Every structure is written in structure tokens, then in C-alpha cells.
Image: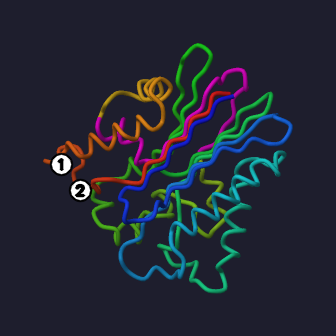
Amino acid sequence: MRTELVSEPGHPSRPNEDFASVALPAGGQGGAVVLLDGVTPPPADYGCRHSVAWFTSRLGGALTELSLSERDSPLTAVLAQAISRTARAHAQTCDLSHPRTPQATVVLARWSARTLEYLVLSDSALLFEGPDGLVTTVLDDRLSRLPRASLATAAIADSTVRNKEGGFWTASADPAVAARAVTGAVPREQVRAVAALSDGATRWVEMFREGGWEDCFTYLRKEGAAALVERVRDLEDADTERRFLGRAKTHDDASVVYAEL
């Protein structure tokens, strides 16, 4: 089995709010991939004394442990348990009901000798490749389907569409959000490799149009995770007229996890 993991901050002066891990249990049967993309709050009070990086580190750590120790639990239950554990760690000091309490997107993939299970919540991406080279993409596209006007400002997004019916969902302090995730399972023999990408890395496809998802997976397999992130950085730097970037930040945290099973 070969794994590769790259996670780079959007700017060296800011902490990386992504979390990425690959977990291989003792005994060599199965494994798991975890990727979180922390949601950066606006520069104002958001009811929590902790940083987004603090939150993603703890939620990601809990997911990594529980995805293996609770192998008989579905991934929705694993996510719910991890959210509850993380919430308890700061419920006494922070206002977890605040709409911008620390939160993150989630990608989970867990495999055994028989099955690969997956879970995606919000706008990170999961890709897996079959023995025939066919690439399957798992996305939670609810954010991308919202009218642009709904996301014009962070305040509007908070009040009308974030973690609301008809909007989009992220992992924060409410374990019930786990039921909102995109989930599924496929036979293990139908998967030879899997990749998880935060939206800083999916810019290769979604923003800069370097190719489709199958092209992205091929590039990742041949050139490596570091090369994919480096290519995104080059494209960001070259877009001086903001033809592709638009109003988005020039550089975002970018994480890629790749595993050949």
C-alpha cells in the first residue's frame, strides 16, 4: 500500500486550518482517510476562545481514532460521536450556539477487505479509481447550487444558508449534522486508489479548469500530491487580473491525501 499526504497553508503567516490523516490499523486489515477544511470566520467575535485550527485538530483527531476503533459503526455515527467529543472539550468556555462557532468540511473514507465506505460534508472532494481506471467523484454540491446573491457577504451566508434547511451544512457543534452528509459504500474490489482534496486543491478543476476530475486524479497519480498543490499555486500567482479567482482569496489552504489500496 502507498499513501501520500500534502497540506500547505494559504499563507505562511497564517495557521493551516486544514487537517489530513491516513490511518492504518494494527493487523493490516483496512484503513481510513480523513480530511477537514476549517471554515475561516470573519474578523469579529464568533463566540469561541479557540481557533479554527484548534477545532479541526481535535475533530480530525477524533475522527481518525473513531473511524478505526468503531469499525462496526456507520460513518455518520462516527462523525456524530467525534463532533460531540469535540464540543464537550470547549462547551464550558465557549458559545457553541453562535452561527460561526468553529466548523469544518469533512471527507471520510474507510475500507475493509470487503467494502469501502465514504462520507462527504460540504465542499471538499473524494475521488476513487476502479481497476478499469474509471474515476468516481463524490461531492456535496449544496453550496455550489446556491444563488450567488445568497453568498454575497459572510453575514448573509451566516444568517440565511449556513447550516440551514435549503442551504449547506458543515460540521460544528451539533452532532445531528452528520445525517446531512453524502454517504455510500462500494465493494472493495472496485477501488484501487482513493484521494481526498480540500477546496484549496480542488481549484485545479473547479476554478482554473485544468481538466475534469478524471484528469485531476490522473495528474495526482502520475505527478504526486505536492505537484498538484504546486500547480494550483502557480495558477493562483499567474491570475493577476483575477479572471479565475474573482473575489476569492488568492491562496487557500490546500490539502491532498492519496492512497493506493
Q: Nearer the viewer, mark 2 or mark 1?
A: 1
Labels 2 and 1: the sequence-earlier one: 1
**Total number of numbered labels?**
2
Q: Amino acid at mark 2?
A: Arg
SS for dot 2: loop
- Estimate the x, y position of residue 168 in percent, counting from the top left: 47, 56
Left or right side of 5 for 162: left
Residue position for label 1: 242
Residues in magenta, as a range: 182-208
Residue lying furthest left in this view?
241
Residue position for label 2: 247
Near-viewer residue (9 or 59): 9
Asked if the residues shown at circle 2 and circle 1 are in contact, with their CB atoms under 8 angstroms apart, the answer is yes
Near-viewer residue (117 or 27): 27
Q: Amino acid at mark 1?
A: Arg
- Estimate the x, y position of residue 142 in percent, counting from the top left: 45, 49
